Image: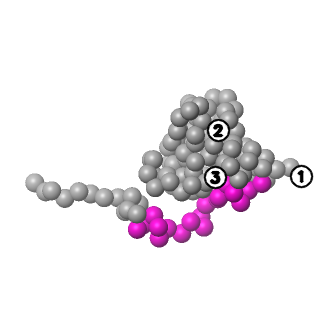
Amino acid sequence: MSDATQVIAASLLDTWIARDWSDGIQLASLKDLTEIRIQTRNSTYEIIVIDHQTGEILIRGGKFFPERTAGYLAGSSRRGSFLKAGGLHVGLNLEVLANHTTVVTSTMQSIVVNPPHE
């Protein structure tokens, strides 16, 4: 019997710090009213950016948001640990604060950004 503990490399702080974050999107870099479509392993989410500076959004999709719901984009995480605040990154989990709770989705598979109509 072994006392060894298996640790996933993505869960290590050094791995998280060294990650190349250029593969994602920071909400602060988008314009208000930008539409974002996120496909996770289990659901599709539609997000409208209300205030890119505060993270205020409208979100619809999955079992938690059957109707457009006001909330805040917390960012991307590894199931609740090591949050990349305000960021959206394929391979991580979307975290949203809405209805007085934090919702963590399944892993994001794709992110499509549609700029607001001018």
- Relative to 87, residue 18 above or below: below
Mark 2 or mark 1: which is in front?
A: 2
Mark 3 or mark 1: which is in front?
A: 1
Mark identifier at residue 71: 2
Question: Which stretch is magenta?
Answer: 14-31
Mark 2 or mark 3: which is in front?
A: 2
**Quadrant of residue 56 within the rendered picture:** top right
Q: Earlier in the sequence, mark 2 or mark 3?
A: 2
Magenta highlight on residue 10 = no
Image x and y of residue 26, in percent: 65, 58
Image x and y of residue 50, in percent: 75, 44
Amino acid type, residue under disc 2 in the picture? Gly
- The secondary element bearing badge 3 is classed as strand
Image x and y of residue 31, in percent: 77, 54
Amino acid type, residue under disc 1 in the picture? Glu
Residue drawn at point x = 50 percent, y = 54 percent: 83
Residue corresponding to mark 1:
118
Residue drawn at point x = 54 percent, y = 52 percent: 76
Q: Main secondary structure of the magenta part?
A: helix
Residue corresponding to mark 3:
111
Q: Earlier in the sequence, mark 2 or mark 1?
A: 2
Q: Distance between the residues labelled 2 and 1?
A: 24 Å
